[in-house]
Image: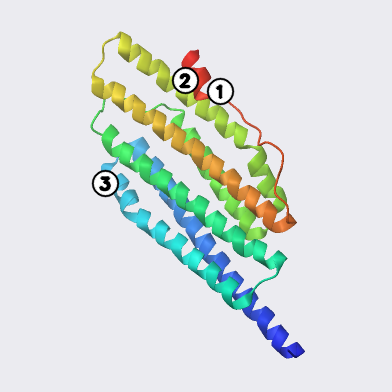
Amino acid sequence: MNPGDHSHTVSAFDNDLAQLERRVLEMGGLAESQLKAAMEALMKRDVDAAERVISRDPELDECERQIEASALSIIARRQPMANDLRYVFGNVKISGSLERIGDYAKNIAKRTIILARSPGVQVPAELGPLGVAALRSLREVMDSFTTRDAQKAEMVWQHDHELDDLVARVMRNVISTMSQDLLGKRKDAEIEGSTHLLFITKNLERVGDHATNIAEVIQFQLSGGWKTAQRPKGGDSLQSILAS
C-alpha cells in the first residue's frame, strides 16, 4: 500500500467513525427528549403526552439497530486497530444504555396513564427534582461524549450519589403515604397508584445508573482502561427504607 492509499483509508475510517458518533448523539438527544416529555406528562397528568412518548419508543430501538449495524460494517470494512476499536465498541455500548433510558421513559409514560385514572393519588413534589436530576445526568454525560471530556464524565460518575439521595427521599415519602392509606383503609386504586410511583422512582434511579455506565464507557474510550473503583452510592436501599 502506498502512502496515499493509507491516507485515504484513515480518512475513510475517520468519516465512518464521525458518522457513527453523530448517530449516537442523535440517539442521546432523542432519549433526553423522551425522558423530559415523560416527566412533564407525569407532573401534568397528561395522558395524550404520555401516549406520544410511548408511540416514539420504536424510534430509539431503530437508532440502536442502525448504530450496531454501522459498527459491524466499520469493523468488517476498516479492521480498526485497538485504539480505534475502543471508540467503535464503546459507541455500541452507549447506544445500549440510551435504549434502556428510552425504555424507562416509556415505562414512566405507561404508569402516568394509569395514575391519571386515580386523581386521589398525589405525585410527590420531590419527584420533579428527581426527574430534573436524572435529565441533568444524561445531558451532561452526552456533553462529555461530544467533547471527549473525561473530567466531565468523571463528575457525572462521582455525583450519582446525589440522585440516589433524591430517590431515597421520594421512596420514603411514597411508602409513608401508602402506610397511612392502609391504616385509613383508603381505596385499593390509590394504594396501587402509590406502587406505580415507586416503580417510576426506580426507573429514574436506573436512568442515573445508565448515565454513569455511559460515563465509564467514555473514560474507557479515552484511556483504554475500565474503572475499578466502586461507584459512590447515596441514599438508602429499598430494603432499609421498608424496614424503617
Q: Nearer the viewer, residue 205 or 162?
A: 205
- Mark number for residue 172? 2
Residue 164 percent coordinates (x, y): 56, 31
Mark earlier in primary sequence (3, 1):
3
Q: Quadrant of the N terminus?
A: bottom right
Q: Where, by quadrant of the figure, is residue 119 drawn?
A: top left
Q: Nearer the viewer, mark 1 or mark 2?
A: 1
- Name the side, left or right, on which 35 lies relative to 216: left
Between the C-alphas of marks 1 and 2, the distance is: 10 Å
* Number of marks: 3
Which residue in the structure is indicated by mark 1?
Answer: 236
Residue 17 percent coordinates (x, y): 60, 70
Which residue in the structure is indicated by mark 3?
Answer: 48
Q: Amino acid at mark 2?
A: Arg
- Residue at (51, 44) in percent of width and height: 135
Q: Amino acid at mark 1?
A: Asp
- Residue at (38, 59) in percent of width and height: 59
Q: Nearer the viewer, mark 3 or mark 1?
A: 1
Residue 37 to residue 133: above or below:
below
